[in-house]
Image (cartoon, rainbow, N blue to C red):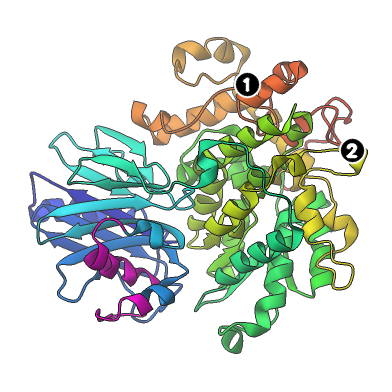
Amino acid sequence: MCGILAVFGCVDNSQAKRSRIIELSRRLRHRGPDWSGLHCYDDCYLAHQRLAIIDPASGDQPLYNEDKTVVVTVNGEIYNHKELREKLTSHQFRTGSDCEVIAHLYEEYGEDFVHMLDGMFSFVLLDTRNKTFIAARDAIGITPLYMGWGLDGSVWFASEMKALSDDCERFVSFLPGHIYSSKEGSLRRWYNPPWYTEEVPSTPYDPLYLREAFEKAVTKRLMTDVPFGVLLSGGLDSSLVASVASRKMAELAAACQWGTQLHTFCVGLKGSPDLRAAREVADYLHTRHHEFHFTVQEGIDALEEVIYHIETYDVTTIRASTPMFLMSRKIKSLGVKMVLSGEGSDEIFGGYLYFHKAPNKEELHKETCRKIKALHLYDCLRANKSTSAWGLEARVPFLDKEFINVAMNIDPEWKMIRPDLGRIEKWILRNAFDDEKNPYLPKHILYRQKEQFSDGVGYSWIDGLKDHANNQVTDAMLVNASFIYPENTPTTKEAYYYRTIFEKFFPKNAARATVPGGPSVACSTAKAVEWDAAWSKNLDPSGRAATGVHDSAYEDAAKTPSAMNGA
């Protein structure tokens, strides 16, 4: 991942302003510690903090067209850049960077080229010939982007809120799948897949077609010039990513430099479900496995830093981001700069445990659509910012555009959880990789019950967080929460505690408005809470809140020790 900052229409374009832009861009250096770049043109600034993954030697940014009249600063990866270069035969490329195609595509096609990009990206482009600019974000919002407005009439864009929150009067999260054009002065959606309308599809389930689509999604994300690995929790999704990646290692161009043995990484409290399962999967796939431990106290000690980096006060995001943040630091210390991760599968296939209560296929499909549309506020934000905090890039094969189209076009009747037919959550994905002749995974891993990451790292992690919050927040503070925080009022002591930390770093109304709210159980949307009347009395984002579904649901589980070991 990289960090981008762009400012257009500054009244002050003095040396002091240039210094201020450099200072603000430096707040993003954790995202791109390898090099810094800044292009100034009149009252326009495009800054970049680079994490070098493709063409580390010559791909510094900002990037340009042939005569440098088009300037672009990009955060992301364009997986089909070689195919796009072949279409641009009349253009001369200066670097081997995958992102340079953006400047040339703009020259060739104008503003209507974003749909041609296959990858994850946020970019801002300046055309100095007419002093117009565009900004765009990838289809699902895998990479973060914010847009803001200064009192002097300036327009700002940044990878993270911290780079513009002090200097903008108002700012918002830039919508995924959209492009902003200064010519029009507004956003428009460039990503318009069939599933976006939430119309229920009827395509029959083809397990081999689904498998092949996922294998293609994983393979294209193995494009790299630096050491990489896979985040392996031992659950279905990350295990499938690791299994497919390990099969492709010998074919990679990078194999001659980095070897053919896949590296895998896992984090958890000692004895946690994820550690055991990940170790078994790693042994089965013969990966070089790295297991990292943390204590509840170490996680609690990191909370302020985590919230500063991920820029949210959402409870489930913070719970899951903290172990990922700690693990990313360890991974980067090993010299690894890129990892593959399993985010997105639960949203696409209805994998969260609350989907057991989906009343019919129509409601299930609509909920999966809602979940995918909101990913940029939750799991994409977590996966990107938790890793980028340490200059590590996370790639997510399940959120490949073509794979999503294939999976979301299947008749959702096949996604319904049907115990009478032996179908558990994500059965169609499990079945697609259930190959008796050439197994991808051991059967019991392939059919392991869903564990949310914040649960799988160790149940006592969440219990320890709640205990800590209870000691920090009094009953009186929670009773008066609606007066202190009238927007998105926290309803638990844990949520209140996170909110106080967030407000310390981001005190503006615009900042708190970037975080979603509303009731949720086991990561559901507010609408899905209506599926079970009992859930309204147990609103917690943990998978264990899916009472009557999770094997270790809160209603059945004995209280685990707070595990404040290592304090």
Q: Amino acid at mark 2?
A: Pro
Res 3 quadrant in image: bottom left
Q: Is residue 270 above or below residue 437?
A: above
Which one is in front in this view, the residue at disc 2 or the one at disc 1? Answer: 2
Local packing at callout 2 (Cα closer than 10 Å; few below 14, some 14-19, many 20+) is few
Q: Earlier in the sequence, mark 2 or mark 1?
A: 2
Stretch in magenta: 86-112
Tell me: 372 left or right of 468. left
Q: Amino acid at mark 1?
A: Thr
* Residue at left offset 79%, top offset 62%: 433
Tell me: 315 left or right of 193. right
Q: Which mark is residue 512?
A: none
Per the image, the residue denoted by label 1 is 492
Tell me: 429 left or right of 67. right
What is the x, y in percent for residue 271? 84, 52
* Residue at left offset 16%, top offset 42%: 154
What is the x, y in percent for residue 266? 71, 59
Secondary structure under tag 2 reads helix
Please indicate, yes or no, whether residue 29 appears anywhere in the rendered image. no
Residue 105 among those drawn in magenta: yes
Per the image, the residue denoted by label 2 is 419
